[in-house]
Structure formats: C-alpha cells, structure tokens
Image (spheres, rainbow, N blue to C red):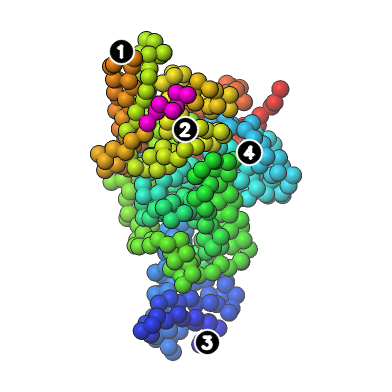
Amino acid sequence: MYHRGFQLVLSCDAFGIFGAGVLQDDRSSSRWRDAIGSTRDARATLAPHRFLGTLQAQIMTTTLAHQLAAFACSLRYEDLSQNVVHEVKRRLIDSLGCALGAWNEEPCTIARGLATEFSAKKGATVIGTTHKAPPDWAAFANGCCIRYFDYNDTYLSKEPAHPSDNFSAVLAIGEAVGASGKEIITAVAIAYEVQCRFCDQASIRARGWDHVTYGAFSTALACAYLMKLDLEQTRHAVNIAGVNCGAFRQARVGELSHWKGVAFANAARHGVFASMLAARGMTGPAPIFEGQMGFEKEIGVSMGDVGSLFTKTAEAMPGEGPASMILKTSIKFWPAEYHSQSAIEAALHLRNQIQDLSQVKTMVIESHDASVDIIGSEPEKWHPQSRETADHSLPYITAVALIDGEVTDKQFAPERFTESGIIEFLQGVKVERNDELSAMYAEAVANIVHVKLADGRTLTKRVDYPLGNAKNRLKDSELEGKFFELAAPKITKDGADKVVEQCWQLDQASDVSKLNGSLEIKEK
C-alpha cells in the first residue's frame, strides 16, 4: 500500500490484528525529518487518510528506538545533577587508570598494533600513543585496555555490566568531532543510563547471550549525541547497532580467553560505526526491538515499558534528575570479578587474625546464586590455566587473598595461579550457595568466608557491601590512589597528576585532545 511517497508494511497476527508496522520513506530523509516525533505534523502530512496518519503517529512515537533517540537528542548538560557530573569525572579517572595499567597486556598490544596500522583525518588517539586511528578502531583498542584487567566499574542487576566500558566509544567519537568536556560528560551519562536501565529490565545471560549485547545500543546513542545527529539519524544508529549486537555468553564460560576482556570493546566498535554510518544517511531495519525478527524475539526477552524511563522526569536516584543511573554503579577496589570483591575483603580481614598461615586447613565460601553461577561452579575455577579464568574464579581469588595478603596484578600472573601449592590448597576450598545472600542480591553483593584452622577453630567474616560499592563509596583520594598505582609506572607521577587534574576540570575543557595527549607512554 502506497501513499504520497510512503510505503506501509504491516504484519498481521492470526486474528487479523496489526502486530507490527514500519513506515519506509521513499523520499529523501531530509524532506520528512520534521515529521519524526511530531504527531500533529505526521497527521497533517497524511490528512486524506486519517487511519494512516494515526498509525504513522503511533509507530513514530511508541517504538523503543524512537524513545531512546528522543532521550539522547533532548538531554543537555544542564539537566545533570552536580553529583552525576562529579561521578562521571570519577569514572573517567578510574577508566583511564585501568587502561594504562593494562596497556602492555597481550590482547591490548594485539588490538593497538592492529589499530595503529590505520590512520584517519578526523581520527581518535589510541591510548598511550600519538597515533590517530579511525574512531571505531580507536574505540576497540582503547576499550580492550579499559576492560582487560577486570578492574573497571560494575553495575549489578538482572544482568551485570561494566558500564565504564562505554568510555572507549565516547572518547573516540568525542575527540574526532571536537566535542566539549560538557558534551563528553553528558554522553557518558546517556550511555550509563541506557545500559543500566536495560540491565534492570531483562537478563540475557541465562539465554546464552553476553551482557555486552546491550553495549552496542548505549555506545551508539552516546556517539549519536556527540555527533549531534537528529532524531531520525539517531534512531537509525540504534537500528544499525542493534541488528548485529548479539554476543554469545560462551565468552565467559569454560576456559576463558582474551575475548572475555575485549568483548565490550567490540560492541563499542559496533556502536561507533553505527553512528558514523547513520550520520552519512545509512538506514537500519526497524522496529529493531519489537519487530517480527527483532531483538526481543531473537534474544528471547521482553523490554517491557523500559522506554518510558528515558525521560527528564524519570529519576534513578531521588533528587538527582535524569540520567542518574551512574550513581547506582560501583567501583572496584581489587582487580577481580566484582562478585568476589566482598570475599576478598573478608579473606584479608581473616588473614590479620592468623599468625601462622600453615595452620589453615580448609576454606568455605558462602555466596549468592549469581556469584556461584558466574565464578564459583565450573571445574576450571579450581584449576585456572589463564588469567581470564583466574580473575573469574571465586575459589582462587579468595584463597590467594588469604595466602598472599593482597590482590594485585601479580596474583594473576601464570606462575602464581598455576603454582602447585595454590592448586593443592584450592582442592580444599568449597563454594556453597546461601539463600539469604541470594535474596539480598543485587542490592548487596555479599560473601561469607570461613577458614578452618589446624587447632579446630573456625574463623568467619561476612561482608555485604565491599569497599567501592555504591553503598560504601571510595573517597576521591582513594580513587586517585588507585589511579596513581596503575598510571604512574607508565606515564610518571607528574604525568599522572596532570591527567587527574584535567579529569577533575573536564567540564571546563573545550575538547579532549589535550587529555588524550597526556596519556602518551614513553617506553624506555
């Protein structure tokens, strides 16, 4: 059915009721762009056929992609609370520290080597270098560094996530288009809001999909905002990113590989590329979420009414205004999978009560279902053969914290996690489910550690909110301490000081080129 340049495509259910519809424009997008999001204009355009006008208005304003686009296009820096702005700066410091700390790791070196083979006129700096690569490649290389140590921030809900992964895309496009510091801050708030709201809405890991699947949407929207795309272009960026976003959960089960630490970097690359294509006029399939073969149908989840939360009146935190989900996320104090953070803290506490570690005989860790399922149940967790498996092993992480009295990068070196003594001790470590702790999740991320000694005593410590949790926040000084520990060996203490200063003053920056330039590593 055609009418005035529009093609109406309808799919009907068995009862003849319209189940989905897409209006495809046969004209240039610029000539009907004003109709997007405007029911009155849409109806006026199709006035001779009131039914089509009403249907078009509904389609154009009710799909999730349109709601997301409207949110990203309407949000402004001035809408953000001071606490949100401050938290974005904190996460930038944390993310850059994680990136510099992991800079020499093998997958980061691989990604950087590949990205620096390509140059771009309007490129983005590959962290640690002066090279400007195409933004999508820079986002991938930088994203590998931010994520690889498993040390960046966390959001836990129906689906877990590491939302600071979004920084790789935001910084890449932000530099390429010359975005201001305030625009960078707003884009980050958008990305956090989208990814965390999606995590609240539906779990996808149980269906075999990886959490980074949501990242293609969050990065595409953040980049579309920075590129100042209009509603129609932003919607298409969402559609393009979404049609290829499905990532297999196999990345995080069994014997883990490099890909566990770089999977989101790939999602960010998709988000950046989707926004760049949309800016040039590329269109994507719609409706991407509700369609007959769209996200909900193929992934096997319902996004429900999550779109209604993407407004300036929906506050994740009371009194904090729109895009305040970042305030509900947590920073890691130790470089290990987040569900182990409270177990680490408990083990370190118990170690201070044990004068002779040779008296330790066995260890029992009581944990919640998510922790057991993700990092405490597979046989590989008791015999880690790679860093990726070791930092996702509840028994190993907790045991090495007790034995070494610390959890740093050293504890994830192959010579440590394959050492015969630690492997032998691991065989006496048990992980048990605790229904009370499971009921408290994800508000609390609790572990109870029991250590049995040779003299028959059992020492016990329970931690519900580990240091860095949203309910037990790191002080700014503690966050800076984490950054200096990771960054100073790579860019010197003076260099690290300059980076921290620029991050705290991000809202005053005209662009991020100076900040990115401050991250250059001068290898000896």
Q: Is residue 33 visible?
A: yes
Q: Please tell me which residue is depicted at 45% across the width and 80% down the height of the picture.
A: 11
Q: Which residue is mark 2?
A: 382
As drawn, the label of residue 2 is 3
The reply to whether discs 1 and 3 touch (Cβ–Cβ < 8 Å) is no
Q: How many marks?
A: 4
**Amino acid type at mark 2:** Trp
Task: Report the Cα–Cα distance between label 4 and label 1.
Answer: 46 Å
Q: Is residue 65 visible?
A: no
Observer-nearest residue: 350 or 120? Answer: 350
Question: Which numbered disc, 4 or 3, marks the residue that appears first in the sequence?
Answer: 3
Observer-nearest residue: 107 or 392? Answer: 392
**Amino acid type at mark 1:** Asp
Secondary structure under tag 3 reads strand
Q: Say if the magenta span includes residue 142.
A: no
Question: Which numbered disc, 1 or 3, marks the residue that appears first in the sequence?
Answer: 3
Secondary structure under tag 1 reads loop
With respect to residue 16, does 127 lie above or below?
A: above
Horizontal relation, residue 165 to residue 38: left or right: right
Q: Which residue is mark 4?
A: 107
With respect to residue 15, does 153 lie above or below?
A: above
Task: Where is residue 317? Give x, y as percent.
Answer: 31, 45
